[in-house]
Image (spheres, rainbow, N blue to C red):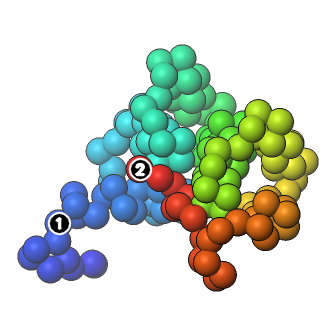
Amino acid sequence: MLTLPEAVSAASLAPAILPVVAIRRVSVPLKFTAGGWVTALDERLLNREPENRGLQYWTGRLDDGRMTQQQVVLGFVQSDENFRNLTTGFFQQYLNRKPTDAELAQYVGMFKAGGSQRDVQKAIINLAEYADSPLAPGTVGLSVYPR
C-alpha cells in the first residue's frame, strides 16, 4: 500500500497522474466519469474545454464499449487539431512566430503521413529562417505550450 505524507493528498495528485492511471489501466478507483475523463483529455492534450458534440462522441464510444480509453487517447493524439497545436508550438519555439496556413498544412501533412514530433522539429530547424534567426546560439524561442 502506498502511503502519502500528510501534506500530500491523493486528491492533489489525481490531476498529475490521471493520464498515466487511465492509459495503464491501473486498478485505482477514480471518481471520474467518462465525461470527466474526456474533458481532462481535451484540457491537457488540446489545451481547451471540450465542445458538446466532441464530448458526446467520445463518451458515447467509451460508455457503449466501442472504444477503449487507449483508443480515445490515440484519437486525440492523432487528431489534426493536436498536430496543428504541436506545429504552432514548434514554430513559436524555434522561429518565434506562428506558421502560415501553407506551413500548417505542410507539417500537419507530415504528421499524418507518419512523421514524429522529432521529424517535424528537425524540418523546422533545418529551415534557413531558423539559421538566420536573431536568437542566441543554443537557445530557443518561446515554450512549446504557451500559456
Label 1 Cα crowd, 10 Å radius (few <14 / some 14-19 / many 20+): few
Q: Quadrant of residue 129?
A: bottom right
Query: Residue lying farthest left?
Result: 6
Image height of 104 relative to 130, above or below: above
Q: Position of residue 123 (x, y in %)?
A: 84, 62
Q: For the point 84% across and 62% down, which residue is it? A: 127
Q: For the point 71% across and 43% down, which residue is it? A: 99
Q: How many marks?
A: 2
Q: Which mark is residue 96?
A: none
Nearest to the observer: residue 129 or residue 23: 129
Task: From the image, tell me which residue sits under label 2.
Answer: 147
Query: Residue lying farthest top?
Result: 53
Nearest to the observer: residue 24 or residue 133: 133
The answer to whether any part of residue 74 appears in the image is no
29 displayed left or right of 65: left
28 displayed left or right of 136: left
Q: Earlier in the sequence, mark 2 or mark 1?
A: 1
Q: Amino acid at mark 2?
A: Arg
Label 2 Cα crowd, 10 Å radius (few <14 / some 14-19 / many 20+): few
Local SS, label 2: loop
Task: From the image, tell me which residue sits under label 1.
Answer: 9
Q: Quadrant of residue 120?
A: bottom right
The answer to whether any part of residue 4 appears in the image is yes
Query: Residue lying farthest right?
Result: 113
Q: Amino acid at mark 1?
A: Ser
Q: Position of residue 73 (x, y in %)?
A: 61, 46
